[in-house]
Image (cartoon, helix red, strand yellow):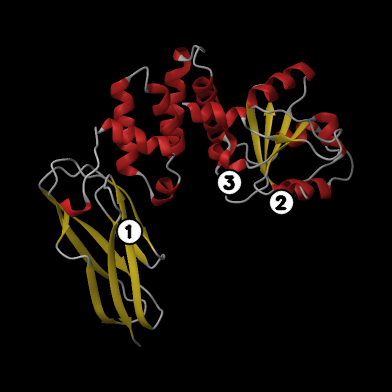
């Protein structure tokens, strides 16, 4: 919970060198409130490199028809996590308390360069990605983050609506925010959502796991750390021998949980994309056998050595190794 408050309070909206171009605020709530005061929509430019602030699109219409902001260090802000754009800069257009459109930098740049005169406000409001389902989802995330920040706000009236929007999109970050909100309201529902996130996360989701999510899962399952020696593998190294380039081969590393506690694998890290692990994300009960499957495919001739690192509720990381000789 504290992280959301901190992220919103530390959301840095930096002013440009010319204060007439850009207005500085420190939170989304401030952006919304000021937009109401001046009766102007807000245009937020999200960047992930301070050098981009010198190249982002600026024009007279930005200051005449919009309240313009530059959001620095965007990937670590609520807005960046909501959008998770493949590239920066990216623009978010607010009107009053809602997002109305999302525009990538290239679209904005071309729009500004190709305009024969002053761009009209309505022209830009209807520009970019304004797919209604996507925009509704972003606004649901915005509402959830604000409810998490201001715990005294009454959100129960629209919770079912927000719930349906988030579940329809079926994205990790939205479901995570929703579970956070349910945590103090509907413990059983929150518990089911956390478990679903844990079991069905994609590789990209796992790379974006917030630290407190790992902590929540440990507490939820009442996990204690197990000793590395108690996770007994039949073998920790496997040699595929001689294989042809681009041939996919698979091996299984079987193990037994000899501890008296559950063993949960949080993540399995490989040294390159040619090695793909598959594992059970559910808790592995004491005295239970399970396995980690490893697929390998490479076109690099010669001897290949790869390391697989297992991260879980174990006092030490567990390392597995594979070897293959690639020959034409």
Front residue of this view, candidates 309 and 160: 309
- In the picture provided, is 105 more to the left or to the right than 237? right
142 in relation to 106, above or below: above
For numbered disc 2, what is the local secondary structure?
A: helix
Q: Residues within 10 Å of mark 2 (few under 14, many from 20)?
A: some
How many numbered tags mark residues here? 3
Q: CA distance from mark 3 to mark 1?
A: 29 Å
Q: Quadrant of residue 16?
A: top right
Residue denoted by label 1: 309
Q: Is residue 186 left or right of residue 55?
A: left
Q: Earlier in the sequence, mark 2 or mark 3?
A: 3
Mark closer to the chain start, 1 or 2 = 2
Q: Is residue 136 visible?
A: yes
Question: In the figure, is residue 224 to the left or right of 156?
Answer: left
Find disc 3 in the rendering and name its residue. 85
Q: Position of residue 219 (x, y in %)?
A: 29, 31
Q: Secondary structure at mark 3?
A: loop
Pointer 3 or 1: first along the chain:
3
């Amino acid at each position: 919970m504290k992280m959301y408050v901190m992220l919103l309070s530390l959301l840095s909206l930096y002013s440009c060198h010319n204060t007439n171009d850009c207005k500085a605020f420190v939170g989304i709530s401030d952006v919304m409130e000021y937009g109401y005061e001046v009766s102007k929509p807000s245009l937020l430019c999200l960047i992930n490199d301070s050098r981009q602030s010198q190249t982002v699109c600026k024009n007279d219409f930005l200051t005449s028809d919009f309240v313009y902001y530059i959001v620095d260090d965007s990937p670590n802000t609520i807005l960046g996590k909501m959008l998770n754009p493949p590239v920066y800069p990216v623009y978010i257009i607010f009107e009053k308390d809602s997002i109305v459109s999302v525009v990538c930098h290239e679209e904005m740049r071309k729009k500004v360069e190709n305009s024969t005169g002053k761009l009209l406000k309505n022209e830009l409001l209807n520009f970019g990605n304004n797919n209604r389902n996507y925009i509704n989802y972003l606004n649901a995330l915005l509402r959830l983050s604000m409810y998490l920040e201001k715990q005294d706000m009454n959100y129960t009236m629209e919770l079912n609506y927000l719930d349906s929007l988030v579940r329809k999109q079926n994205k990790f970050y939205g479901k995570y925010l929703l579970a956070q909100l349910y945590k103090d309201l509907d413990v059983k529902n929150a518990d089911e959502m956390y478990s679903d996130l844990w079991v069905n996360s994609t590789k990209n989701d796992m790379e974006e796991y917030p630290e407190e999510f790992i902590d929540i899962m440990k507490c939820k399952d009442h996990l204690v750390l197990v000793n590395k020696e108690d996770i007994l593998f039949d073998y920790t190294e496997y040699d595929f021998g001689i294989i042809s380039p681009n041939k996919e081969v698979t091996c299984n590393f079987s193990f037994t949980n000899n501890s008296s506690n559950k063993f949960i694998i949080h993540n399995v890290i490989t040294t390159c994309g040619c090695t793909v692990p598959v594992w059970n994300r559910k808790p592995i009960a004491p005295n239970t056998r399970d396995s980690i499957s490893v697929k390998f495919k490479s076109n690099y001739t010669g001897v290949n050595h790869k390391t697989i690192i297992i991260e879980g509720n174990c006092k030490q990381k567990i390392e597995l190794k594979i070897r293959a000789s690639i020959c034409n």
